[in-house]
Image (tube, coloured by chain):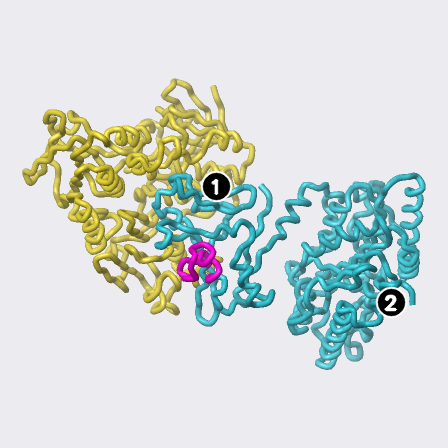
Amino acid sequence: MGAYNTIAFKPELCDGCNACMTACATAKNGAPDIINSRIQIVADGGSFELAMCRQCGDPKCVSNCPAAALAKDDANGVIDWDGTKCVNCLLCTVGCAYGGIVHNAAAGHVVKCDTCGGDPICVKACQEIHKGGGALKYLTTANIYNEVGDLEDLFVPGLAGCQGCNTELIMRHALRRIGPDTVLATPPGCIPGMGSVGYNGLTGTKVPVFHPLLTNTASMLTGVKRHYKRQGREVNAVALAGDGGASDVGFQSLSGAAERGEQILFICVDNEGYMNTGMQRSSCTPFGAWTSTTPVGERGHGKTQDAKNMPLLMMMHNCEYVATASTAFMEDLYDKLDKAIAASKRGFAYLHIYSPCTTGWRFPSQENIEVARKAVETNFVMLWEFNPRDGLRLSRPLDDALPIDAYLEALGKYRHLEPEQVAHIESTVAKNAGFIKSLAEGRHPAMAQAMSGRA
Amino acid sequence: MQETQYLIVGASHAALSALQAIRMQDAEGSITVVTRDDALPYSPTVLPYVVSGRLAPERVALKDGAWFEQNKVGFIRGAAVTAVDAAAKRAKLSSGEEIAYAKLLLATGAAPLLPPISGLKDVRFHVLRTLDDAVGLHAALPQTKQAVVLGAGLVGMHAAENLAKAGAQVTVVEMQPRVLAGYFDAEASAIIEAAFAAKGIKLMLGAKVSRCDTAGKAVRVTTDGGATLDADLLLVAAGVAPVTDYLAGSGVDIDRGILVDDSMRSSVDGIWAAGDVAQAKGFYDGKKTLNGILPEAVEQGRIAGMAMAGDPAAKPYPGGVPLNTYTFFGQQAVSVGSQEVDKIGGEVVRKEADAKHYLKIVMQDNRLTGIFGINVPFDPGVMWELILRRIDLSSVREAFIADPQKTARGIMSRTWR
């Protein structure tokens, strides 16, 4: 059994427009009478709620059917109804606690959602009328599991990351996809710190792994890659580095390798500081953030400088591929990982993945994906990709961002912020978003420069 | 001697539900299913549609051989368990074979109850509980001009409708003053009775059959009022009783059915029971009662399976709620909760009926205890959950009474979505 795609509903985004129901009724019954819709939105006080088939994993409608007319399709997870077997006993409606299968007078039998064969018209209608910001979404992330689930996990079990850390997820997913023909470099930071380099003479990976200095990761990978090339072996040269190892002392070798167009995939896992060694600031630590070296007290109020924009700096190297990604948007992350792997066969590929740090950013360990999502939804983090032919493309629109407070309030490291600091962050985010937008639209001269590769 | 970790006796809803629950927790433990029917698993509920010809007997199987194989389950059909030795943990089959088990689930269901009517044993009559019964009734249809059905419960009413649709003149004789007395009150039953009368089905309510005789090719049925009916097909549908005869001497406590606790465990360690054979806690009064309906069989089977496999997510049985759905001549009747409003201390907060529609809502302390409707849409599964969760409806009481379906869906979506 695989994982399945699903229709998701966010009640806080629903305005009760009924577009979903009208579309469903029209598609399934030939007329827009919403009583015949298989998705039912009900007004509940001032908000809206949903009654429709959940395509349950352990469906009671199926268990309750005396005629075997209902069955869960193992391939797509949809519970199918077989009209040639149904005896109209309605016992399925007793089993369903979600109002997901109901007798329909027009049809003369029970009806339920069939997800329109994997392309639900209710979701399309909702997103069309709300320009992509509607309450209904068709989640296809299950495809990742189905595609990647069988690939070998190339890290050992039991990496000792902090509770709730997303970096382990990034590492395991990335290396599964990159595959076993890989030499991995993990410069000092959380990634080797949690055991990927190994213990007691054994590596923490099932591929060759080495532990360069913070300064020379990209140089050493250059040598490794060129050596194998000379031997005639096709090997992925991959770095899994932190933001410190990429943006601070490791930057010169990284910049050099990017400029030379070395065939390397450099993944920067950005947790905005030296979290492994006690949460010191890095050049990627944002303005106002508490770290152990930008403390908060009588005089200190967190970091006083803005973060270095690493991915933009890398873009200006005219790399074969540069992209930003977030663990809250895994399909996008995978898409970019695939492109980065392919680009690293031709030249330098740089993938910058934001990874909230439960320990150093001070938020509950179960909130990690939510924090990552809020960062993107507020434009604090922007998802885009670049290649020299197409320039910079946004992966997600920057309009209609949530207010920055939605992100800052989720994190302990910003708890001390004064209103003027919040205002500074707000204006920086707006400025950055405007800049990225102008690059995406090709309005900024820097874009032409990045694409030509030379000033 | 064959040995198995889990032995499941019976192969209908309770048994299959238990089996699936066991496999959720224990992917490898050996499971053996034994059933007295020589058929793939089927539901007694579907049988009226085999009688009518709507479904061919080979199309009613709930699971096939491949499914048992896939789930690594040994399936022995056409073999009844004739004795259980609880001390030695062995079950004896009608074939003479013995099976040693670690855990035993009894899901042997129920069998038709034959009322003590003089002469009944000596006349030809049908019952409807097994696939063989249904096939026999279907075969008898073409020759049936006059049919008499004893009992106006769900089986009798379904059969009567299907016999009439097949062209027979049908009379239903029922001791109670109304049809489906277990699920509907007089006003609701009246709507159902009117639909049957409109189709030419004669309902003799409050009538008792005093004797049956053979009269030529027919069976002559005499009521205590002195009326006589000649039937070339007599169907006895006077209820069912749990099948427990094989438990004599096993030490398993039996009242009307096998007495079970809140995890469906019987009085004997290592033996569970679920479905129509079990006598489990009622939701309203906590007294152990028979609640022989399909959704409860599924529920009890699941709880028993989880307990047998030691599933840590197992929750105690909340208690049985009478509920049913009944479709008759294209109309829908739904009953969720107890009809015994007085006994459970409930209050009828809405009741209305016309020729085609009926709705009754019963609450106690602003909590739903029952909802009953004919041709009125609401979600029985959502209502059942509202009852089981004893959800306080005081803040939405008026809205619920006015539009139970919509209000309940809202509560569902924000409470257990």
Quadrant housing the N terminus of chain A: top right
Point out which mark residue B306 bears: 1
Q: Is residue A81 left or right of residue A195?
A: left
Q: Position of residue A64 (x, y in %)?
A: 40, 44
The extreme front residue here reads A30
Residue drawn at the location 39% of the way across and 64% of the way down: B407
Q: Magenta stretch: dominant SS?
A: helix
Identify the residue at image location x=39%, y=63%.
Answer: B406
Q: Which residue is mark 2?
A: A449
Q: Are marks 2 and 1 on the same chain?
A: no
Q: Is residue A218 left or right of residue B25?
A: right
- The kind of secondary structure element at disc 2 is helix
Judging from the image, mark 2 belongs to the subunit labelled A
Which range is magenta? A21-39
For residue A13, above or below residue A190: below
Q: Amino acid at mark 2?
A: Gln
Depth check, front residue: B109 or B90: B109
Furthest residue in direction left, as rendered: B226
Q: Is residue A343 above or below residue B57?
A: below
Query: Does A26 appear in magenta?
Result: yes
Q: Colour of chain B?
A: yellow
- Residue A173, given in percent of the width and then of the height, sits at 72, 49
